[in-house]
Image: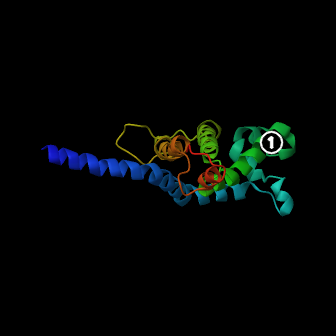
Amino acid sequence: MNALISLHNAVFDLIERAGDWLMPLLARFTFAAVLLIYYWNSGLTKLGDGILGLFSPSIGAYSQIFPKQLEAAGYDVSQLGLFHWLVVMAGTYAEFLLPLLIVLGLATRLAALGMIGFVVVQSLTDVYGHGATDAKTLGAWFDRASDSVIMDQRLLWVFVLLVLVVKGAGALSLDALLRRRHGDVAP
C-alpha cells in the first residue's frame, strides 16, 4: 500500500510541477482560441469609417455601450457628452489592446485583471442596458442548464482570466522573457 501511495504522490507531484508552467500557457491559449477574435470583432464594430474612425466611434459603439442614453438622445450621438465618448473609446481600445497583451503574455496579470473588469461591465450592460434578463440568456448557477450567455459562459471566461491573474503568463511569454532579461527570479 505504501508503494502505491508513493507512486501516486510521485506522479502527481510531477504533474503539479508541470502545471505551474503549463496552466498559464493553456489559459492564454484558451483565451486566444475562444475570446481573442470575439473581442477584436466587437471592437471593429465600434470603429467609425476610415482612419479617423480610430477617434470617431460608430453609432453602434454608443448603442452597445450606452443603449438607453442613446435612445433618450433620439439616436443623435452629438447629444451625448465627452464622458460618453471617453468611455466608448476606452472600451473600444480595451477590446483590442487587453486581449493582445494576454496572448503575447505582456503585462498579463494587469491585462487579465482589466479583462475581468471588462467582462463584468459588459455583463452589467447586457443586463441593465440591453435588458438581457430572460432565463435563457441570463441563466443561473447551480441549475441543470449550463449554456446561458451571462452567468455560465462568462463565469468560465473570468475563471480563465483569474488563472492568469494568479499564475501570471507562464514561462513562454514576454513577461518571462523580460524577467529573465532583468535578472528577476520571481514569477
Residue 127, above or below 23: above
Left or right side of 37 for 70: right
Furthest residue in direction bottom, as rendered = 50
Residue 78 falls left or right of residue 97: right
- Assess disc 1: are there few (<14), some (14-19) or many (≥20) residues with their C-alpha within 10 Å of its C-alpha: few
The residue that mark 1 highlights is 86
- Judge by depth and name the residue closer to the eye, 126 or 41: 41
Q: Secondary structure at mark 1?
A: helix
Residue at 64% in and 46% down: 111
Q: Position of residue 87 (x, y in %)?
A: 76, 41
Query: Could you say which quadrant of the image residue 103 lies in?
Result: bottom right
- Return the x and y of residue 171 as percentages of the image width and height: 53, 54
User: Does 55 sit left or right of 28 as displayed?
Assistant: right
Residue for point 53% across, 51% down: 170
- Could you tell me residue 186's position as x and y percent? 56, 43
Residue displayed at 50% across by 51% down: 24
Q: Position of residue 35 (x, y in %)?
A: 56, 55
Quadrant location of the C terminus?
top right
Query: Front-most of 125 and 154?
Result: 154
Quarter of the image that includes the N terminus:
top left
Q: How is the image coloured?
A: rainbow
User: In the rendered structure, which amino acid carries the disc numbered 1?
Assistant: Leu
Residue at the left extreme of this rendering:
1
Residue 81 visible in the shown view: no
